[in-house]
Amino acid sequence: MSDFKGETLSWQIVNGAIELALHREVCNEISSLTLTELEKFAVALPKLASSAHALIIYSKQQAGFCAGADLRELFERGQKMDKSAALQGVREFLERIHAVMNAIDAASIPTIAAVHGVTFGGGFELALVCDMIVADRMARFCFPELRLGLIPGFGGIPRLKRDLGNAVVRDLLLTGRSFNVTKAQQIGLVSQIAAEGEALRVARGTASQMGKFDRTTSAAAKAFVKPIPYDELKREIDIFCDLYSRPAVEEGLRKFVQNEGPQPYLP
Amino acid sequence: MSSSAIDQTVEQILNLAAAHFKVPREKLTPDDDFFKTLGINSLQALDLLTRLEQHFRIELPDYELQGVSDFRTLANRIQSRL
């Protein structure tokens, strides 16, 4: 389908580029429904790519690009079933979203994440799937998972390692701190910074430039410079599942979900 | 760090917060709880943090702000990074 309007996201082709817009309140938390709609996109992508020269992923939510996994759903689902069923559900979710992420990563056309505001956890991982990140000057990045006793589970560590030096990766993971776009550009994560509110416009201009080149050459260059770390991605799922089944994670999620203060529970 | 430096930093924070969150400057005082006075949530607090980092040209890890909710303590944290 050339265009789609779902409950959490939509896509259409605009001036020759596929534009995938995230639009779930509050900040595009990735739920089961988001995953289902992302899977629809992944299925449609090869055909869409045959009639487009680039893919741009962006958010229509003011708060940011994406705040990551829907932790409330993750916690509440875990409460409704026994531990082995909950773990199996988590593994299935991870395997499904990895398939989506890998499909976007391997897209034959150039891909751009146009991000602003909160780009955390799974949202950061979605951005890392893209060939480049164009960031609004107010964008903020973070892998907070270790603060809840987990690791990033949507392919974040292997893809961060692909793009950045290991020392920087360790800092970002082991502190769980957030960082701004200036830092993101310094460490080589963001290649272009846009003025506030202008990331999508800048991404469209970049996509237009990319569209001038021979498709086969662009695809070959991309495949050469951006190999997909499949083995590490599989290991990430195993490590995440090993960690998820511990009581400390349930307690961390409970504190996060049930926190009613102005600041989220993030130790 | 000197108290005058802290005072100057507080003043800059208050001016920035008042302008961005459209709160009359005279309603903000250094010891205010900025979550309450500005009426902001955690996502907006991150926005404020990013603006402060850009204004002061510093990197301020969010874990240094845990438990910080008043402008004066925030100014102290910023001063330690200048």
Image (spheres, rainbow, N blue to C red):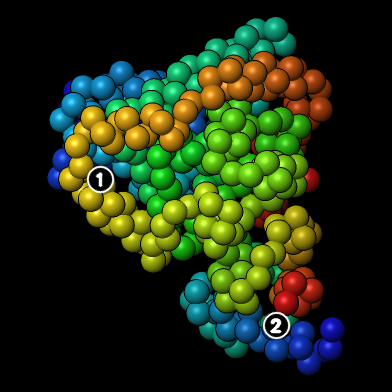
Disc assigned to residue B66: none
Disc assigned to residue A210: 1
Label 1 resides on the chain identified as A
The quarter in which the C terminus of chain A is drawn is top right
Circle 2: residue type = Val
| Residue A187, percent from left and from top | 58, 54
Which residue is at a point 36% across and 56% down the rendered structure image? A199
Q: How far is the residue under mark 1 from the one under mark 2?
A: 46 Å
Q: Secondary structure at mark 1?
A: helix
The quarter in which the N terminus of chain A is drawn is top left
Compared across the picture, whether A39 is left or right of B35 comes to left
Compared across the picture, whether B16 is left or right of A42 comes to right
- Taking depth in this image into account, of A111 and A56 the one nearest to the observer is A111
Q: How many marks?
A: 2
- Taking depth in this image into account, of A51 and B3 the one nearest to the observer is A51
Which residue is at a point 36% across and 43% down the rendered structure image? A112
* Residue that numbered label 2 is attached to: B10
Q: Please determine whether, in this image, residue A174 is positioned above or below residue A138.
A: above
Which one is closest to the eye, mark 1 or mark 2? 1
Which residue is at a point 68% across and 31% down the rendered structure image? A151
Circle 1: residue type = Met
- Taking depth in this image into account, of A171 and B33 the one nearest to the observer is A171
| Residue A255, percent from left and from top | 75, 37
- Taking depth in this image into account, of A165 and A135 the one nearest to the observer is A165
Which quadrant would residue A110 be assigned to in this image?
top left
